[in-house]
Amino acid sequence: MKLFLSIFLLVSLVSTPDLATIRKIYPTASGSETSAKDFTAKLNDISTTDENILVAYKAASILLDSKYEKKVSAKMSRFKEGAKLLESTVVKEPNSIEIRMIRLSIQENVPGITGYKKNIKEDKKFILAHYKDQNTALKEYLKNFILQSKSFSAEEKQTVK
């Protein structure tokens, strides 16, 4: 019985963050170094065997965190790590509107010098085409993203209001 309780307590301490919490934190994670580091820490224990959506958020956290690396080589290494991880989630779940939103949110905000901007039109088109098919909570989350995004026109923003 003690062994069971010990295992239960250990599993409780190393729990996977819930998606609702991650969705709440993500929009402000890029606001400061502290926010980015906190977001990264929340997703630190996520591995490639977890749900793809959580892996995509972890990839975004790595990409956001790379901005605050001091050495250029570390910055580029961390950026490439995050981009590779994010792209792997898109390959695994190409029809996930939320993973596409994450990639779009990253690509529209990274410097052009990174070369990581090639899927903006594709992801925007996918999001607009599949928006109406989502559940209420995800629609609201996507709507909030679309309304603040610089990739969507005023006319496209009106379609989600």
Image (tube, helix red, strand yellow):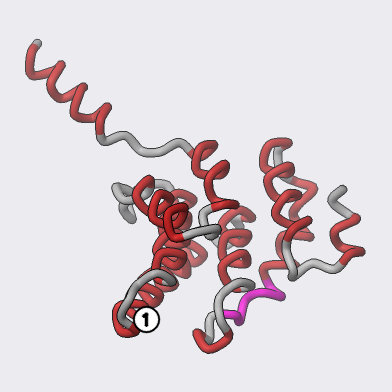
Q: Left or right: 31 with respect to 64?
A: right
* Mark 1 residue type: Met
Q: Position of residue 18 (x, y in %)?
A: 45, 36
From which residue to which does the magenta span run?
117-122
- Which is nearer the eye, 150 or 128? 150
Query: Picture coordinates of residue 142 (x, y %)?
Result: 70, 50
Image spot of residue 157 (x, y percent): 85, 58
| Residue annotated with mark 1 | 76
Q: Is residue 145 left or right of residue 13?
A: right
Q: State whether residue 152 is above or below residue 27.
A: below
Dividing the picture into quadrants, the one containing residue 81 is bottom left
Residue drawn 74% across and 55% down? 130
Q: Judging from the image, what secondary structure is the residue with disc 1 in?
A: helix
Residue placed most toward the observer, 130 or 5: 5
Instruction: Using the image as rendered, state which of residue 50 and residue 146 is in the foreground.
Output: 146
Instruction: Judge whether residue 120 is colored magenta.
Output: yes
Quarter of the figure with residue 75: bottom left
Residue at the location (25% across, 30% down)?
13
Give the residue at the far left of this rendering: 2
Identify the residue at horizontal 40%, vertical 64% (top origin): 65
Percent of width and height locating residue 5: 15, 16
| Magenta stretch holds residue 32 | no
Q: For the point 56% across and 44% down, which residue is it? A: 23
Against 127, is 151 above or below?
A: below
Q: Would you say 58 lies left or right of 110 here?
A: left
Q: Name the quadrant containing residue 141.
A: top right
- Position of residue 74 relative to residue 37, above or below, is below
